[in-house]
Image: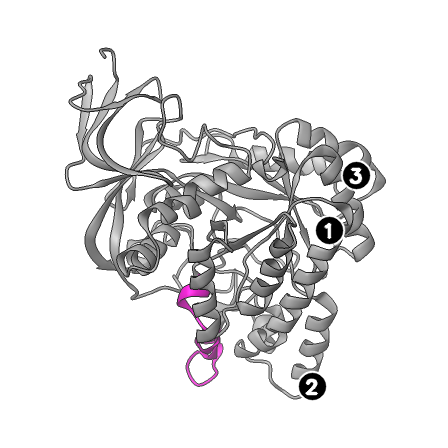
Amino acid sequence: MSGLDLVIAGGTVVTAADTYAADIGIRDGRIAQIGHNLSGADRIDATGLLVLPGGIDAHVHLDQPTSDGTTMADDFASGTRSAAAGGNTTVLPFALQIRGQSLRACVEDYHRKAQGNCHTDVSFHLIVSDPTPQVLGQELPALVRDGYTSFKVFMTYDDLVLNDAQILDVFEVARRERALVMVHAEGHDAIRHLTRRLEAEGRTAPYYHGQAHAQIAEREATHRAISHAQLIDVPVVIVHVSGRDPMEQIQWARARGLKVHAETCPQYITLTADDLRGLDMDFDGARYVCSPPPRDADSQAAIWQGLRDGTFDIFSSDHCPFRIDATGKDTPRARSSFKYVPNGIPGVETRLPILFSEGVSKGRISLQRFVALTSTNPARLYGLYPQKGSIAIGADADLTLWDPTLTRQIRQADLNHGCDYTPYEGLQITGWPVRTLLRGQTIAQDGRPCGDPQGAHLARGTSEAFAP
């Protein structure tokens, strides 16, 4: 076939179902042909490389306001540059509603932040923190119909937590409008109780964040969220699952035919609670503070089993970056108690290399499972498939070329995010993305973003979670 703009030649194509040798022909930003000996105006030699669908990071926080005056380290420019360098072509950040704010106004604010600054495609999840009658009756349904087909609710954090009645109200809207709800499942009152007790005992170092956010509180909230979803009969996604206890609740639900989906993240396969100890219980542990926190070796083993057996549908970064300096984690207030340390760690650029190296290169998961967890399943779950997450005729030519043998360490000095550290410093990686293409245009090569921002905002369809 003539008239191809670009041919990716000689690579090994990997999808969620197959692995095969083929050339990929691209025209007008879409995959136009898959075959052998294709010719086009331009050519990329992919000999010895894997050709995968571009990564889709379905859980990313960018340029998000905070209630304590700290500053998130990544805006849309730096965050999406970092994502592209890490092999991603689409990210799904959150538009966080501040209490008292119109949800529609919140979305407009985030569009202004993102406009003209995105190196990858983006699509917003909504965060519902103030489910007023106006929001539930008018704004949220209208936004879902405009293509914002997923939103998140929190079961903890003072400025975000919804009570059970509010969660049930939001679930009712989700069922009626066929929108997918993501749930941050941690028990707010349990965490507050444990925090008060630890502070009274003088245990205020960052390490105790992990004890306050106990796995029991995550397990209880996970079961409660599932029960509410069962009552309303609506699919849900339990996000950033950290260990065995909440996993067992998800498996319990699925065994009963409930539509409960699950996500986990790099911190739960690489870090443990001991990382929060820092050096002799000093403030160094603050760089690992996130919620839920990393657990223990048994939890890591459970997470790997869930990645293999299908308990987890998706593997996201939960990129939530704060600098260690006085603009972020290292403030006098944060040093007074772990409860004031901003919750979140960076990871959008390192998500794919970590799972590839720890999973594929070490034989824990297959290449096909890697693609499913990091691209195809997020596209299916969040209404982007088959435009995204696939290598097929007519799909966007969002592709990542991988060198499965390239070995090097993760180093802060090599990363492109706005943060001043990485929690994965020194981790040895085998298998790196060496070129990222968005609609056929190279947006990163050899770990460096390139070109001007060309990402677009994507309206999304209904999640496949609603399929019969």
Which residue is at 25% across, 11% downward?
3
Instruction: Estimate the x, y position of residue 108 in percent, counting from the top left.
Output: 64, 33
Q: Residue furthest front?
A: 256
Q: Compare residues 238 and 287 and report the one nearer the observer.
A: 238
**Depth order, front residue of 327/404:** 404
Other-residue count near label 2 (Cα within 10 Å), few / some / many at <14 / 14–19 / ≥20: few
Residue at the spot of label 2: 200
Circle 3 is placed at which residue position? 136
Residue 96: give x, y in percent of width and height: 64, 45
Q: Secondary structure at mark 3?
A: helix
Q: Which mark is residue 161?
A: none
| Amino acid type assigned to the residue bearing label 3 in the image | Leu
How many residues crowd around disc 1 within 10 Å: few (fewer than 14), some, or many (20 or more)?
A: some
State the residue in front, 467 or 33.
Answer: 467
Labels 1 and 2 touching (C-beta < 8 A): no
Amino acid type at mark 2: Ala
Q: Residue furthest top?
A: 2
Q: Nearer the viewer, mark 1 or mark 3?
A: 1
Q: CA distance from mark 1 to mark 2?
A: 39 Å
Examine the rendering and report whether any part of residue 459 can be seen.
yes
Q: Residue under label 1, please give it.
A: 230
Tag 3: Cα neighbours inside 10 Å, few (<14), some, or many (≥20)? some
* Quadrant location, the C terminus: top right
Let me know if residue 10 is in the magenta part. Answer: no
* Disc with the residue nearer the chain's start (3 vs 2): 3
**Among the two numbered marks 1 and 3 on one chain, the one whose residue lies closer to the N terminus:** 3
Is 180 above or below relative to 286?
above
Which SS class for mark 1?
helix
Name the residue rendered at 42%, 35% in the picture.
Answer: 389
